[in-house]
Image: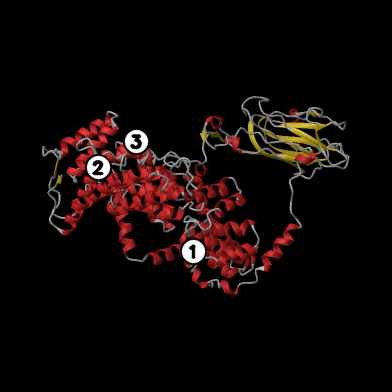
């Protein structure tokens, strides 16, 4: 028989009856032992029921459980919960579970016991059930609901349910709007899913709390490109959820320049819960870029009104209108894209081109100046020092992006080790922004920002009327016409088998600057047989060492149109760290010679007229070690003699010792002081 002293309300009585029936029905042969392995759904319901009881005002009095023999057993909740924790830490999971269940039945207010049950469920890989308990604990632990919701987030991710995990983080931001953890990890999650515009909202909230870190500020410089803030592979491995497919597609499109493959990825989401407005907008952009107009029409006709909140939708409409030569309407569409995404350089570039085309050159000049500023910000943001960070902060302030500006003001202060002393100064800036924002609506702020970026009021240009657009067949005709000039890759079939060697790592991590430059190609008729021959410049190896790179290659074209490698036979296989090449007649004998730009000494190969070349690099006066990125020959002074022009690059020996990384295509973890990877954060809290 089970006895309990509960609250006297009708709800309490119903809950009491429910608990009594459950315990009476599922009693174990051992007194007070209730095995979660035997009836998991019942225990889960019992735990949640206990939580509801606790939340009813006036509840919380302790209960007692008696055996059928009548011997009373009063359990001290705190002491027994502590014992359950000790059993858990000792690896005695079943014993810990049984003891914790007894405590929860006897004392629903024991959050420690509930935590033990959740942790045992995690040990059993029953992550969804553990997450449910953590969500309920967040309602009970008023002093720190975020930690419980972060546990729920972690376990929902492990259960393969990122949608529920996102709800956990949203709850965290609402229950504790002053806690940076919820905003930070939510931004990381949305960013990994390719929802870059939504990420902005939560990073701004993070900035308002004074918590935005350097990499987070960098991620907002260009919202149109993917940027890695955190990887979630360890939480949901492999990342098979369709909610992450958009992020994969964006990386495929940007890093691999493969729009067709990216389109296949987002097409696989059609009709699923993951086929949101942001996915549809991105799909439309890809359709317009890699397919014909008939499919674009189908895409356009399938849209709902919420698509107009997506900047990529307006960018795509602008592109289509530009094809239709409806330039003024296209300007308005691009303007709407920029209103939603003030980092949209593609739309700004298109507006500048259109303004020149319709004769509004003064306006085009202002837009180009804005573009120049944004491009300079992108270049300086990576590894920005104190002065560069201050410059970026000032420019963002002028571009009406005040919260980002504050983050960039913070960076130089942090670099100088003065963050603690100058927090008040940063908070004063934030308060000024809040006061400014209170004077205007969000739409008014967006309008003001757009006018600053463009230099004119975009409302002067007509809103596109999609119903009155030109026939879609015009795009089809354009597609058919363009196919007459389609290129096909026939290199391998014609005998040209070569790959540029630079030693640039495929991961884009820890590379040297000289590894980022490609080689060069010269098209010449070195044997004067009327057929074009090909000379390929190679690199790789250490540019500071002589002849340490891959050999250059000369392909001779045969009468049947195929090519054969004659690099060794022609004595033209230079092994300098090549950067470029120029074919020109140097000694005026009618046979083209080769001038090769290297890192180190440049090379000159004189054509002997018999199918071979002679290395005459000594003819180049002052041919010292330097980084020549390009080379050309011309008659500069009109004396009918060839002159040599070298375009030289970095003059710094230490450049060959410095390593770099491409931030936009590399997943980077947040600094430990910020929050760390999501699962690291949770691990440090005791799970």
In the image, taking residue 350 as reference, residue 438 lies left or right, namely left
Which x, y percent locates residue 297? Answer: 60, 66
Q: Are marks 3 and 1 in contact (CB under 8 Å)?
A: no
Report if residue 405 is visible in the image: no
Q: Which residue occupies the foreground of this view, 344 or 262? A: 262
Numbered label attached to residue 114: 2
- Viewer-proximal residue among 637 and 143: 143
Q: Nearer the viewer, mark 3 or mark 1?
A: 3
Mark 3 or mark 2, which is nearer the start of the sequence?
2
Residue 189 vertical placement versus 620 (above, below): below
**Separation of disc 3 and disc 1 at Cα?**
43 Å
Q: Residue furthest bottom?
A: 468
Q: Nearer the viewer, mark 2 or mark 1?
A: 2
85 lies left or right of 9: right
Identify the secondary structure beneath mark 2. helix
- Name the disc covering residue 474, or none: none
What residue appears at the point 14 percent right and 49 percent down from the top-left corner? 60
Residue 94 visible within the image: yes
440 or 105: nearer the viewer:
105
What residue do we see at 66% from left, 61% from top? 292
Residue under the image location 16 percent in, 59 percent down: 10
Residue denoted by label 1: 307
Residue at numbered disc 3: 123
Furthest residue toward front: 69
- Identify the image quadrant of the N terminus: top left
Which mark sits nearer the N-terminus, 3 or 1? 3
Q: Counting residues from the N terminus, which is met first, the one under dot 2 or under dot 1?
A: 2
Helix, strand, or loop for circle 3?
helix
Marks 2 and 1 close (CB-CB < 8 Å): no
Q: How many marks?
A: 3
């Amino acid at each position: 028989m089970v006895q309990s002293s509960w609250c006297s309300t009708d709800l309490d009585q119903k809950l009491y009856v429910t608990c009594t029936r459950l315990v009476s029905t599922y009693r174990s042969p051992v007194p007070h032992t209730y095995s979660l392995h035997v009836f998991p759904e019942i225990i889960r319901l019992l735990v949640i029921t206990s939580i509801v009881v606790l939340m009813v005002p006036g509840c919380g009095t302790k209960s007692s459980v008696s055996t059928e023999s009548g011997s009373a057993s009063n359990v001290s909740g705190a002491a027994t919960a502590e014992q359950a924790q000790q059993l858990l830490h000792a690896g005695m999971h079943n014993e810990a579970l049984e003891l914790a269940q007894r405590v929860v039945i006897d004392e629903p207010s024991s959050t420690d016991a509930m935590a033990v049950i959740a942790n045992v469920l995690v040990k059993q890989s029953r992550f969804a059930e553990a997450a449910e308990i953590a969500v309920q604990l967040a309602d009970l632990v008023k002093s720190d609901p975020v930690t419980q919701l972060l546990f729920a987030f972690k376990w929902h991710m492990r259960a393969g349910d990122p949608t529920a995990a996102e709800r956990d983080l949203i709850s965290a931001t609402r229950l504790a709007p002053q806690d940076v953890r919820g905003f930070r990890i939510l931004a990381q999650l949305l960013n990994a899913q390719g929802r870059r515009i939504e990420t902005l909202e939560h990073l701004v909230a993070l900035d308002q709390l004074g918590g935005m870190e350097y990499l987070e500020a960098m991620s907002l410089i260009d919202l149109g490109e993917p940027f890695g803030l955190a990887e979630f592979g360890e939480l949901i491995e492999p990342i098979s959820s369709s909610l992450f497919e958009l992020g994969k597609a964006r990386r495929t499109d940007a890093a691999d320049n493969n729009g067709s493959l990216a389109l296949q990825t987002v097409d696989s989401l059609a009709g699923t819960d993951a086929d949101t407005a942001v996915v549809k907008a991105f799909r439309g952009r890809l359709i317009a870029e890699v397919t014909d107009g008939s499919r674009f029409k189908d895409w356009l006709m399938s849209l709902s009104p919420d698509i107009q909140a997506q900047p990529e939708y307006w960018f795509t409409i602008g592109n289509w209108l530009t094809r239709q030569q409806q330039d003024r309407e296209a300007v308005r569409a691009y303007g709407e894209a920029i209103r939603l995404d003030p980092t949209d350089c593609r739309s700004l570039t298109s507006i500048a081109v259109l303004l020149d085309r319709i004769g509004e050159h003064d306006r085009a000049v202002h837009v180009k100046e804005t573009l120049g500023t944004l491009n300079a910000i992108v270049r300086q943001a990576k590894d920005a020092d104190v002065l560069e960070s201050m410059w970026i902060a000032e420019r963002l302030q002028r571009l009406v992006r005040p919260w980002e500006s504050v983050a960039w003001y913070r960076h130089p202060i942090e670099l100088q080790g003065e963050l603690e002393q100058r927090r008040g100064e940063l908070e004063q800036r934030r308060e000024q922004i809040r006061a400014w924002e209170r004077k205007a609506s969000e739409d008014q702020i967006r309008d003001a920002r757009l006018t600053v970026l463009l230099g004119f009021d975009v409302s002067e240009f007509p809103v596109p009327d999609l119903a009155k657009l030109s026939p879609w067949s015009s795009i089809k005709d354009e597609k058919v016409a363009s196919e007459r000039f389609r290129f096909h890759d026939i290199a391998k079939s014609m005998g040209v088998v070569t790959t540029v060697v630079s030693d640039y790592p495929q991961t884009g991590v820890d590379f040297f600057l000289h590894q980022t430059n490609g080689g060069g190609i010269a098209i010449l008729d070195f044997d004067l047989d009327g057929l074009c021959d090909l000379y390929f410049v190679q690199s790789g190896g250490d540019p500071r060492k002589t002849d340490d790179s891959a050999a250059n290659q000369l392909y001779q074209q045969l009468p049947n149109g195929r090519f054969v490698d004659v690099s060794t036979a022609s004595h033209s296989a230079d092994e300098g760290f090549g950067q470029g090449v120029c074919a020109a007649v140097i000694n005026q004998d009618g046979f083209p010679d080769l001038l090769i730009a290297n890192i180190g000494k440049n090379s000159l190969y004189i054509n002997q007229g018999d199918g071979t070349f002679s290395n005459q690099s000594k003819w180049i006066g002052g041919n010292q070690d330097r980084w020549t990125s390009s080379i050309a020959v011309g008659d500069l002074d009109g004396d009918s003699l060839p002159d040599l022009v070298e375009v030289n690059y970095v003059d710094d020996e230490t450049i060959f010792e410095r390593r770099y990384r491409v931030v936009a295509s590399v997943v980077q973890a947040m600094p430990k002081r910020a929050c760390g990877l999501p699962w690291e954060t949770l691990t440090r809290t005791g799970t």
